[in-house]
Amino acid sequence: MTGKRLYAAVSAMLGISVMLSGCSFTGAMERVVDLVTDSEAEESTAEKETVNETFAVYDIDESIAVPEFAVQAAARTAVTKDTPIALQMIATSPDGGLISYQWYRNNVQSNGGGTAISGATGDTYAPDTSMKGTWYYYVVAVNTVGGKVNMGTSTVSEVSVWDNMYWQQNADNGGYQYICRDDGKFPAGISMTIDGTIYTFNDEGFVVDDSGNLIDIASGQPIITGPEEETIALPEEEVVEAAPAEEPAAEAAPAEETAPEEAAPEQTEQPVEEQPAE
């Protein structure tokens, strides 16, 4: 890594070289390029690769296993200003080595080229949320076995800090969005901790429940909206002339009532008195 170590020294000496030698800036740069190129050519023949991660220089030994990450922080986290959060990345050593960590912060979504965070050398890190903005964090894990090391890098965890926000209800669907007064932006496609409560926002920025239903932020219940009314065109009715109504049939004269026959009175035998004999 001699070439990489030369960059800082060459950069500092470049201006002095131009002044003392009287060479043009272009000429001086050509000398720098030649110097670095030769150094990198020598480096390519080395058996070990030395990596400068800002705070430490490691001699990578390929015979040592690359650390494997068993736990990685969420890809995206959104919070309001001054809300405490913690990111955790846990790596393991396949060959039983000692794992150490160094956290980095970046202003682009990349797990390389970031700035090492002083003192952030554990598997958990609590980012600063006192300022509005979006930052990207990752960790480099070092596996050390018998004085030899190999390294692995975690995925990137995005942390966005929001401030000066207010709730706004949509007039069309009744849903709620969390709007920034400064620029009109709102969180979308992410979960966010607001005043100690975790809210989930869909891709359009509306608060939803686990089933994707819009919810009322006051009650936490789904917002019920009726289905849209459809206008159905009915076919034109055919006009059919009605047939003339038939005259009702003459009503039959009611049958005469026949008086019931009186039953003849029953005759009863009268007893015959017997005449006394003379």
Image (cartoon, helix red, strand yellow):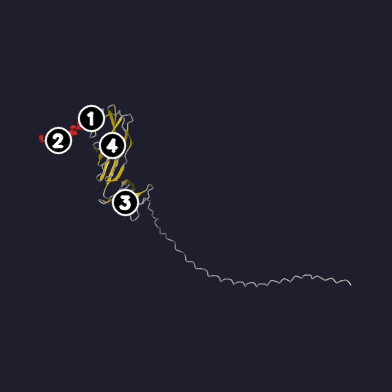
The image position of residue 130, as x and y in percent, is 25, 44
Q: Quadrant of the C terminus?
A: bottom right
Q: Residue at x 14, y 35 (%)?
A: 14
Residue of label 3: 177
Q: Element at badge 2?
A: helix
Q: Residues within 10 Å of mark 2 (few under 14, many from 20)?
A: some
Q: Residues within 10 Å of mark 3 (few under 14, many from 20)?
A: many
Q: Amino acid at mark 3?
A: Gln
Q: Amino acid at mark 2?
A: Leu
- Mark 2 to mark 1: distance in Å? 23 Å
Tell how many labels: 4
Q: Amino acid at mark 4?
A: Val
Residue of label 2: 14
* Relative to 128, residue 152 above or below: above
Q: Nearer the viewer, residue 83 or 224?
A: 83
Q: Is residue 256 left or right of residue 47?
A: right
- Mark 3 to mark 4: distance in Å? 33 Å
Res 139 label: 4
